[in-house]
Image (cartoon, rainbow, N blue to C red):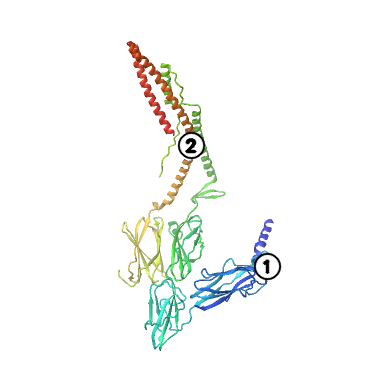
Amino acid sequence: MKRCILITFFICLFALPKMGLASSLSLSPDSGTFLTENTFNVSVLLDTEGKSINALQVFLTFPPDKLQIISPSTGSSIVNVWTVPPKFNNTAGTVSLEGGIPGGMIVSKGILTTLTFRVKSVGEAFIKFASGSRVFLNDGLATDDLNQSKNSTFLLKLPPPQGPVVASPTHPNQSVWYSNGSATLDFSDGTSGMENFSYILNKDPITIPDNIGEGTRRLVSYDSLSDGVHYFHIKTFQNGIWGGVTHFAVKVDATAPAGFPVDILPAKRTASAQPVIQFATTDASSGLDHYEIKLEPVSYQAVRAYSGNVSFFVEAKSPFLPPDLALGSYDVLVKAYDKAGNFREVKERLVITTPIFKFIANEGVIVNNLFIVPWLVVWFIGFSLLLVLVFVAFKVRSWRHEAVLMHKEKKLPKDVLEKLNELKEYRKKYGLKLLSIIIFISFSLLPFDKAEAETLNIAPPIISTISENISNKDIFYVGGRTDDTRETVIVYLQNLLTGETISENTTADSEGDWFYRHDAFLSPGNYLLWTQARLGEQLSPPGPQTMLIVKKTALEFGSNRLSYEAIYLSMVVILLLGIGGLLAFIIFHAYHGRRKHKELKEEIKKAEESIRIGFAVLQNDIASELVVLHKAKFVKSLSDEEKAKEARLLKDFDDISNSIGREMEYIEKIGEEIR
């Protein structure tokens, strides 16, 4: 019940006001034909359909290359107060009107403003209401009441011929754009008594040629014309008088539309069977006419899904939503055509994949669309992995705890204990008072490895589409156009390594388009590609040769292929997991090891100082006894026992000095390593 009430509330809140919209905007006249350099008026009208309105915002657009505003008028406008002065821009082709009507007004075909346009060039001109135009009700709530807006279309033409009749075999229709940059104009009207012609070609729609004759030739050609509208102006000299002028338009657009990206959403590699394809471009001269799109399968999996079917270019608008696609790789080919027939083709690679993992509520996890892992197995593997990690964590913690205890209880390494016992023996032997020395040294080292014919009149076929950057897991295709719809196109493909050449035939369709798709994978290597046309028994010259490189990106096991992409992806995942775990392990133990090393450095400094003092005292005591024995030599001869004692003291002094040197080198080395 509550849900029904909420639905009803939102319908009343949002839907009902929309249903009540009534006001409309229109232009008068809404169509017409006008001549270049002439002017015409267009009025902007408002119909409130019986409602009271008190404010409005109206925005218009017009083609600035064809029309120019020369006199906007608001004198007879129903708008009393212009909140923003009316503005127009002949460069951008825009008009903006923003005003109010205090107290409100109900009007039918009320004039907001009248615009006077000058015709600059020939063609079709559209005057449109732009988005953002609004009409506000006089209800105190500023409610937008605009229901519809009606645009206008005008045909702009040159003045009727007043001189000789002009025709063009290359550009016959003055309102049509042509990609041919060479124009031929014929003005042989069969008039007798003609004495001379004066003519000129420029970009001004209305020009009067000078009175200097160009001769009696009735045909003239112009080459390499720039893109845009060119105007041919001509008059004749007859019976001593220059006649009227004829103007003829030549529209040239030999440049393809601008390059553009093809965006695939959500991504170029996606698990969605219906990705959204977006594209947009512009054309500077004739303007865009339409787009065509084609999805060509290139992987074996995709080709097999569409076995026997040949895809064609179809007219499309952006965004384009293709039918559900099978798994595999596709080349998305988009052609943008301008009104002169030029086109720009852009290609993007699309890969439809299966998600690695997919969850099914009551069954389990689907792995790469190959098999289902039941939930029982998933939980068993998960808890088993958790137990293993707990065990490893316990062992690591025990190792750190043991290191902490050794540091706390001052346990000495075996070699250090042997040195201390040796010093104790010397102390007992000589009765020396040595300072007690306790040295604790521990190291933590985490090792890791660093990873890393005949010449005939038949023209050869034109190649416009080719599968570039393919590998031995992609299907090769090529397409283009021919001059004759009856032609058979022969496609030659030569392997430069083996010299083997294959040839395949395909036939052009009714539009002259042809397309060939290979039915098997090409082996890796470099290839030469060229084409030849056959019409009956006649062959055209071979077309230009194109280099094709097929990369090796898949391992072959009989009829099966394992993509390097899949191998690399698996290796990268494993490597990243290993690196991540290793980094976490290193950071954790490096942090705690650094603290222990800092404590050890302080202890080693104290130990070094104590050892130096203790060994110095030991050497001094032994040296004192030797001095006493040496003095006794000068007083009396030493007995055999005293001589033996002297020899023993000298030997012990040398041994202790060497031991002190080795001990100091050992401790200094440990200190450097810890630092």
Relative height, residue 291 to residue 654 (above, below): below
Vertical arrangement, residue 228 with respect to residue 470, above or below: below
Q: Which mark is residue 138?
A: 1
- Which amino acid type is marked by label 1? Asn
Image position of 5 with respect to 419: above or below: below
The residue identified by callout 2 is 589
* Left or right relative to 207: residue 144: right
> Can the viewer see residue 341 in this picture?
yes
Judging depth in this view, the residue of 197 and 28 nearest the camera is 197
Q: Quadrant of residue 143?
A: bottom right
Pick the residue in front: 526 or 252.
252
Q: Label 2: few (<14), some or many (≥20) within 10 Å? A: some
Q: Which of 367 and 438 is in front in this view?
A: 438
As shown in the figure, which amino acid type bears the numbered disc 2? His
Which type of secondary structure does the marked residue at label 2 adopt? helix
**Element type at marker 1?**
loop
Classify residue 626 by image quadrant: top left
Quadrant the C terminus occupies: top left
Give left or right: position of 128 versus 450: right
- From the viewer's perspective, is the residue at label 1 or at label 2 nearer? 1
| Residue 21, x across and y down, in percent | 64, 68
Q: Residue at x 35, y 14 (%)?
A: 631
Whether residue 440 appears in this view of the structure is no
Q: How many marks?
A: 2
**Residue 520 x/y as whole percent:** 39, 58
Task: Measuring from the top left, give residue 87's x and y in whole percent.
Answer: 57, 69
Q: Which residue is drawn at 34% across and 65% down?
A: 544
